[in-house]
Image (tube, rainbow, N blue to C red):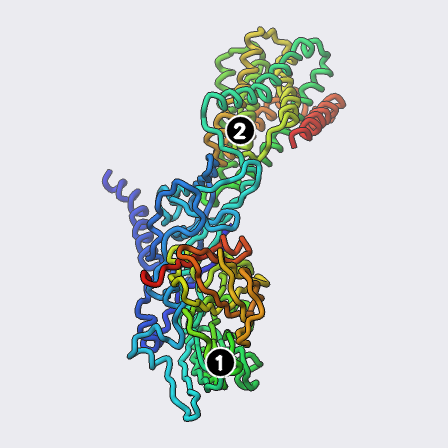
Amino acid sequence: MWKLSRRAWLQASGLVSLAGSIAAGARLKGQSGTAAHPAHTSHVMGTVGRTSTDLFNPTAFLRSWNFSELAPHVRPKFYRETSRGDGTLLREYELFAVDREIEIAPGLFFPAWTYNGQVPGPTLRATEGDRVRVTFRNLGTHPHSIHFHGWHPPAMDGALAGQEVEPGGTFVYEFDADPFGLHLYHCHTVPLKRHIHKGLYGTFIVDPRATRPSADELVMVMNAFDTTFDAENEVYAVNTVANVYMHDPIRVTVGRPVRIYLVNVTEFDPINSFHLHGMFFDVYRTGTSLQSLERTDTLMLCQGERAILETTFRYAGDFMFHAHQSEFAELGWMGIFRAGEAATT
Amino acid sequence: MMRRLLLALAPLLLLGALLVVIIRSGPAESVRGENFPPVERLTFQSVTLEPGAIVLSVMNDGPDAINIAQVQVDEAFWTFTAENGVALQHLGRTELRIPYPWVEGEAHVVRVLTSTGAAFEHEIPVAVETPQPNARFFGVFTLIGLYVGVIPVAIGLLWFPFLTRLSARGMDFLLALTIGLLVFLLVDGTQEGFEAAGLLPESFQGAVLFALAAAGAYLLLEGIGSWLKTRGRAADAGYGGWVLAVLIAVGIGLHNFGEGLAIGSAFALGEAALGTLLIVGFTLHNTTEGLAIVSPLARARQRVSLGDLAKLGLIGGVPTIAGAWLGGFVYSPVWSVTFLAIGVGAIAQVVGQIVRQMTREGSVAGMLASVPVLAGLFAGFAVMYVTGMLVG
């Protein structure tokens, strides 16, 4: 029994100049850390080795939106904001679709379709009432689109017949950021399952005009990968890389509020879930209300469903978080928060 | 002289040059293109269960190189160490040691993921600790070999005094019965051999291996038969009696060696919880083999000492023990295919000999058409079929 499964990463020639620093670290497959197989004396669940963070750094991704992770001189290529005089902003984004091989577990590569070379795509963040203008270029090999969740006219839907953007084509999506809440965007070209599970999705946050209380904010996208293309996932994660926050715990501060923007885009499995050890959190479903109606330690989300979670770490130390489907947890969707005292972090 | 040498070498040199050109230019590569997916195949050579660990021996059976990226056990990523690294060239092997708390008597699935995300699975249907070659297991396998191989064959031989008192028609019946038994073993061994061949990596070409080993065994036994005849060990005219009995014993011994391999490996892999019924089945089944060995002697009306009978019994039965040892400790499907094939070749040769002996006068068709022969053939099949149900 054997299966074909790889399509080597296509280097879009136009990508390098456009994507600038994002693509600068491009490297061939197989160069990252599978060589080191440490000796084990006990039973250890999890992946072996470390993924490269050259192309995608899941830790940086947690706290990046509107391309804030880019150097100041590069960022305007992808994100510009202009005042509209009425207190709102025009936010302009440059997104492009491109085929790229991504590392989803140490040494394990997936022939992804990506927005801006990364999975999940860049997190977009506007304030209620802002004008959002997304220039989308398709540098990939298949037709793609961007379908935003939120209020918009049908012409901006990206999902209706004829709204795909052909390879080499460009389309500008423009709409008002409304309603406030936690949304997502994804490709809506058919076959839908493939276009989504190949990696074309991202987070779209719309802040309320009356701002939420200050907090340490984290973006977490629950996703999964079917590396054998049999409509069953081999790898589960938050933010793409299996077990990455086990090896590289998310640093948080005791006593400082934490706000998690949790999005579920897992394909093939009807639901996914989030469970936090030793703590409870307030849930704001879809983030469309400033009033939490639920306090729990385990939250279930359907595909496309999302929620804002708020909590404050009471104790210092390690707190595990994972899907409460043990199977997903053991296939990579498991991580650790490392809470430190305020002075030490 | 030089000229002749040159003429012999010239085509080889040209062939070498052609290979260089093919490798340099890579015609297949230009068809496949730069981004064509590699063809990946990974074969599980053996799976060993130790306390708290699963050890996989895997081989890259595909044409392209493979990088093993991760291992999952029962749908969970699990850490592992690789004895020979994780980058495997064509036919490269490595040993993966997974510190996994497997559960005795339960099933586990191991999955190896390559760098491209290709997944190769192996199921352990019933997990039991793989026996180490220590005295206790040697003892157990020896006992199993005695039960299913040596003792039943010996019991079958004890029919000899009875057989010598049979009439000519009774003798025909008996030899036909022997043919029936052997043809059954022939079919059975062929089926098992091809089954084992299917487990082999494709590069090993299991079916060809089987056919060649069977043909080789057939021809080798023909040679041995002629040699024994010229030595004149037996006084019988032609090719019957003692020589035939020895050949049958050798054929059955080889078959039993293959059977021992299967039993030993099944026991070792925990795939067949080798119950009492299975041992009983093999015991009944193999008793008929003793009968097959002595019937040509009985027909030749030869006087045979108890020592000679014992020798025949040992030739036919003892290989079961050796097979069980080998199967239990160093099992690989290559051995199974090879020895089952040798057994098939040997049995085919023996069947041919018996038929020839029975048709010294007249035609094969005429001989087969007689009532005692037909009855004997049928009885042989029936006995094997029914006792075979006990081990199926």
Neighbor class of circle 1 (other Cα within 10 Å; few <14, some 14-19, many 20+) is many
| Residue B248 marker | none
Looking at the rendered image, the disc whose residue lies closer to the viewer, 2 or 1, is 1
User: At 44% from the left edge and 77% from the top edge, which residue is drawn?
Assistant: A124
How far across and down, in percent of the image, does residue A211 sit?
A: 46, 79
Circle 1: residue type: Pro
Circle 2: residue type: Gly
How far across and down, in percent of the image, does residue B300 sit?
A: 63, 12
| Residue B116 seen from this side | no
Residue pointed to by mark 2: B264
For marks 2 and 1, give the CA distance: 72 Å
Question: Which is nearer the eye, B20 or B291?
Answer: B291
Q: Secondary structure at mark 2?
A: helix
User: At 39% from the left edge and 52% from the top edge, which residue is drawn?
Assistant: B67
Chain ID at mark 1: A
Question: Which is nearer the eye, B315 or A293?
Answer: A293
- Asked if residue B184 is positioned above or below residue A258 in the image, the reply reads above
Neighbor class of circle 2 (other Cα within 10 Å; few <14, some 14-19, many 20+) is many
Could you tell whether B175 is left or right of A299 in the image? right
Question: Which is nearer the eye, A162 or A285?
Answer: A285
